């Protein structure tokens, strides 16, 4: 994980060779597992039997990557096919300008991945973390009944109003945190005039919010590279969204997971989000924060495996 202080970011603004500070994308490194998808190229890894029920992991951000969700690969041992991928403009996937990381691009990407790996008739589950849980809900709202079930880990909200309230709590809690102040100041010093600078700046901002989210300081959730442009541009293109209008048609069970160390997404907040789904259950992981997929990976994978097995048994 790249951890950059205010002074180091300030120094970087005046130097060259920034490419050495972040790993290359699929366009730079031909050895990375990848999938050509329309006009983009995604860093993507699959594990397990391609004919088995499908689990599609959807990482957070926008602009995160799947590295912290790699514990889900263990589900292949349970007879499942797991798809791990970095979203457009994020992680080690291809970088794009702002007008190529809009909501329509993201909608089409997830639709294409679901259709490619889980043709109609094959069970398919979405496991989303944070923004990824919002992204999964957006897909479900657009395609109710298309998926067999979903595990939603600490989503910020499913409407623009809910997300605004979430970030008001997050930034209010962290407003006087030294890390956040450093990140905001460094963003002024390092102009995101290219993807590398934008990605480094986004990494600093993500780092700054870890304390109120209750994330581990001893076993931090790893990542390859942040996606600065998509983190800035995708929310703007979403506008005044509402991804709840068709959720009542998703009649299968939906599992919400939260950590009790997260002071931003409280139990009552998750309960309100879960109420958008007709058949939702909330599980709280004790001693966990927003990074529970990584920090409590054995418990989390066991929880997901149990949920998936129940859904598959009920569908048979």
Image (tube, rainbow, N blue to C red):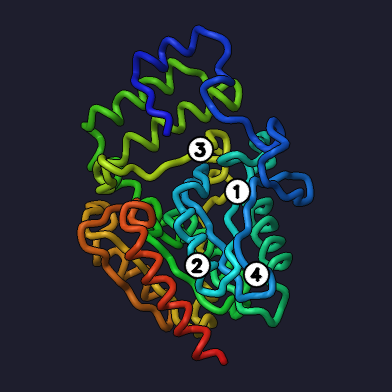
Measured from the top left, where is residue 118 in percent x and y? 68, 71
Relative to the observer, which residue lies in front, 144 or 253? 253
Relative to the observer, which residue lies in front, 282 or 193? 282
Q: Nearer the viewer, mark 1 or mark 4?
A: 4
Question: Of the residues under marks 1 and 4, which one precedes in the sequence?
Answer: 4
Mark 4 element type: loop
| 134 lies left or right of 176 | right
Mark 2 element type: helix
Q: Which mark is residue 49?
A: 4
Q: Nearer the viewer, mark 4 or mark 3?
A: 4
Relative to residue 147, is residue 192 depicted above or below?
above
Q: CA distance from mark 1 to mark 4?
A: 23 Å
Relative to residue 145, is residue 175 depicted above or below?
above
| 187 lies left or right of 231 | left
Q: CA distance from mark 3 to mark 1?
A: 13 Å
Relative to residue 144, is residue 287 depicted above or below?
above
């Amino acid at each position: 994980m790249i951890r950059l202080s205010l002074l180091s970011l300030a120094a970087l603004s005046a130097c060259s060779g920034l490419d050495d500070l972040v790993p290359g994308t699929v366009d730079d490194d031909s050895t990375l597992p990848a999938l050509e998808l329309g006009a983009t190229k995604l860093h993507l890894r699959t594990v397990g039997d391609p004919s088995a029920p499908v689990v599609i992991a959807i990482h957070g951000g926008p602009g995160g990557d799947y590295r912290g969700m790699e514990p889900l690969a263990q589900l292949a041992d349970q007879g499942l096919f797991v798809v791990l991928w970095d979203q457009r403009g994020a992680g080690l996937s291809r970088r794009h300008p702002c007008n190529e990381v809009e909501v329509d691009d993201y909608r089409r990407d997830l639709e294409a991945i679901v259709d490619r790996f889980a043709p109609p008739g094959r069970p398919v589950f979405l496991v989303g973390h944070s923004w990824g849980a919002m992204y999964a809900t957006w897909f479900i709202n657009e395609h109710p009944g298309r998926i067999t079930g979903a595990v939603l880990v600490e989503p910020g909200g499913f409407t623009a109003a809910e997300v605004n309230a979430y970030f008001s709590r997050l930034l209010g809690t962290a407003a006087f945190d030294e890390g956040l102040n450093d990140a905001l100041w460094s963003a002024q010093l390092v102009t995101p005039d290219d993807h590398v600078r934008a990605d480094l700046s986004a990494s600093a901002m993500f780092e700054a919010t870890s304390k109120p989210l209750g994330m581990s300081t001893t076993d931090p959730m790893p990542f390859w590279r942040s996606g600065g442009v998509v983190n800035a541009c995708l929310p703007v293109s979403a506008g005044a969204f509402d991804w709840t209008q068709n959720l009542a048609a998703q009649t299968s069970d939906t599992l919400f997971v939260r950590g009790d160390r997260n002071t931003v997404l409280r139990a009552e907040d998750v309960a309100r989000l879960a109420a958008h789904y007709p058949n939702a259950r909330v599980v709280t992981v004790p001693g966990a924060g927003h990074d529970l997929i990584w920090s409590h990976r054995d418990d989390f994978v066991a929880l997901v495996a149990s949920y998936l097995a129940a859904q598959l048994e009920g569908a048979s």
